[in-house]
Amino acid sequence: MALPIAFLEQVQTLLGPKGWTTDPDRLEQAATPWRGTYKGQTPLIVMPKTTSETSKLVHLCSEHNVAITPQGGNTGLVDAGTPHGEVTLSLRRMHGLRDLDSFNNSITIEAGATLRTVQDLATDADRFFPLSLGSEGTATIGGLISTNAGGVSVLRYGMMRDLLLGLEVVLPDGEVWHGLSGLRKNNTGYDLKHLFAGAEGTLGIVTAATLKLFPKTAKSTAWITCKAAGDIVKLLALVREHAGDTVTSFEMIPANALEMVRKEHPQIRDPNPSQHSWRVLCEISMPKENQARSVLETALAAAIECGLAEDAVIAETLEQTQRFWTIRETIPLSKRAYGTAINHDISVPVSRIPDFLDAADKQLKRNYPGVEIIAFGHVGDGNLHFSACEPANRITPKLAENAAEITHLVHQLTTEFGGSISAEHGVGRLKRDELIDIRSPAATAAMRGIKSALDPKNIMNPGRVVPRD
Ligand SMILES: Cc1cc2nc3c(=O)[nH]c(=O)nc-3n(C[C@H](O)[C@H](O)[C@H](O)COP(=O)(O)OP(=O)(O)OC[C@H]3O[C@@H](n4cnc5c(N)ncnc54)[C@H](O)[C@@H]3O)c2cc1C
C-alpha cells in the first residue's frame, strides 16, 4: 500500500491542500461501504476539482502504476466502489451544472452531483428527471452511470443507460474522451457511452454527463391489496391495458415486510390494513393529475371487479403519496434492524415471478426451517429484492453461517427460471467470479478484451466486474 514518494509529491502539487487527504477518519469512511458488512482500505483520497486535474492525476497514476478506485456517494451494494488498497478518487468536488437546455430536454452536469440535485434542477426548469431510488440524496451521477442504476421508474423510463445522451470520460492513460452531446441521433460507429454505463469504474473516470429530461408529469398513486403473487402479475397486465406506458412504477410489498417496518417504526401504518398477503404500490404519470387519477380509478375498479385486487386506496395528497413511498423505502433498513438478512438482487421474466417465489419458498423452508422470506421491489421489471431473514434474537441462529449456501440456492433457482443474479446493483467483487459459470464464455472473453484494450496496466478499479484470466 506504500505509495511512491515522487508520486505523492506530484499529487500534492497538482491538487493543492484541498485536493487530497490521508486523514485516518476520512480514509476509514471511504473504505466503509453503506451496508458496512465488509471493510476495505485506502492509503490516500484524491479529490480533483476539474476534468483537467482528473486527467493529469490519472496520467500520474498510470506513470507510477498506481491503482485507482473511483468513488461517488459510496452507496453501491456490490463491493465495487470500496477501495481495497487502491487510491480513492472521489468525484465529490466536481458537481457543477454545465448546461440545461429545456427545449432540447437535456442537462449536462459533472459526475459528483447527486441524483437529488439533478432532479431539483430539472424541476426548477419545469422539466423532470425520472431516475429515482432510495439513495438519491447521496448517490452521484457518476456512480449511477457506472452501475447503470435502476430504481422505481424503470418500467416507463428505463435504466440509467437509457437516460444517457453523452459522456465525458478520463481514460486509464489520462486522455479525455469528450463525448458530451445532447443529440438523440448520432449514428457514427460504436456507441462508446454504453461501454462506460455499468462498467463500475473499470474503464475510466466519468467526469460529466449529458442526460435526458422529460416534460413534467402529474402522478396518481395507489396502494393496492392483493391475495397472491399470481394476481399481482395479472394486475400489472390489466393496469397496462388501461394505462399503457403511463404506468411508471409497480412495486410489490409482502405483508411480512410491512410487519418488519411497523415493528421498527410504529408510527408507520399500513394505509389500508388487511389480512391479505401482498400490497402493490402502483403509480401512473400523465400530463394532468385528473387524467392519471381517472385512468387509475377505472383500472382498479376493473381489477377489483374481476378479483385481481381485493381493495385499493388512491393517494389524495402529495403527503399521502410520500407516506406510501416511505413504507416501500423503509423496508431495507427495517430488515437490517430485524436481524440477519441474506440479500439478493435478482430478476426473472415477470410471468415467472409467482412460480419462482413458490419454488424458492419451498426449497428454503425445507432446508432452513424457520427462515422468513422477504421478496419485495420492482415487480414491473421482474426485479425482486429477495432476502432470507431470521430475527436477531433467534436462539439457534442458522442463516449467517449458511449465507453462501443460501445465495447459491437462490442464484441457481434464478438461473433455472431464466433470470439474472444481478438485476440492477451490478457485479463488483461480490458477483464477479460467480458470473464466470453463468455468463457465456464468449461474453467473458470479450469483456476481458475490452478491459485490456482500454486499461492495459489494469489500474482502473482492478478486480471488479471482469474475472481474472
Ligand atoms: C438505500 C439504497 C437504495 C438503493 N436503491 C437502488 C435501486 O433502487 N436501484 C439501483 O439500481 N441501485 C440502488 N442502490 C445502489 C446503487 O447502485 C447506488 O446507490 C448508486 O448507483 C451508486 O452511486 P454512488 O455515487 O454512491 O456510487 P459509488 O458507490 O461510489 O460507486 C459505485 C460504482 O461506480 C464507480 N464510480 C463511481 N463514480 C464514478 C465515476 N465518476 N466514474 C467512474 N466510476 C465511478 C465506483 O468505482 C463503483 O464501481 C441503492 C443503494 C442504497 C444504499
Image (cartoon, helix red, strand yellow):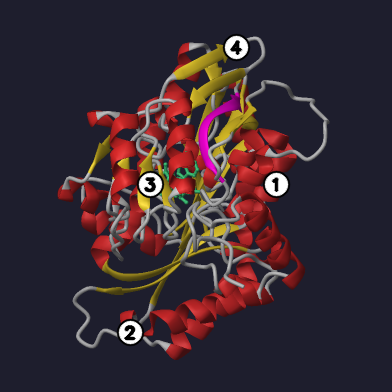
Label 3, on which residue? 329
Q: Secondary structure at mark 1?
A: helix
Q: For the residues carrying marks 2 and 3, which lies nearer the camera in this image?
A: 2
Q: Earlier in the sequence, mark 1 or mark 2?
A: 1
On whether ligand 1 comes within 8 Å of the CB at mark 3, the answer is yes
Label 1, on which residue? 238
Label 4, on which residue? 101
Lateral position of residue 331 relative to residue 159, left or right: left
Label 2, on which residue? 401
Q: Residues within 10 Å of mark 3 (few under 14, many from 20)?
A: some
The one nearer the camera, 356 or 230, is 356
Q: At label 3, which amino acid type do we have?
A: Glu
Q: Earlier in the sequence, mark 2 or mark 3?
A: 3
Q: Secondary structure at mark 2?
A: helix
Q: Is residue 440 visible?
A: yes
Q: Secondary structure at mark 4?
A: strand
Q: What is the magenta segment's predominant secondary structure?
A: strand
Lateral position of residue 66 relative to residue 452, left or right: left
- Quarter holding the C terminus is bottom right
**Furthest residue in direction front, as rendered:** 6
Q: Which residues are magenta?
A: 204-212
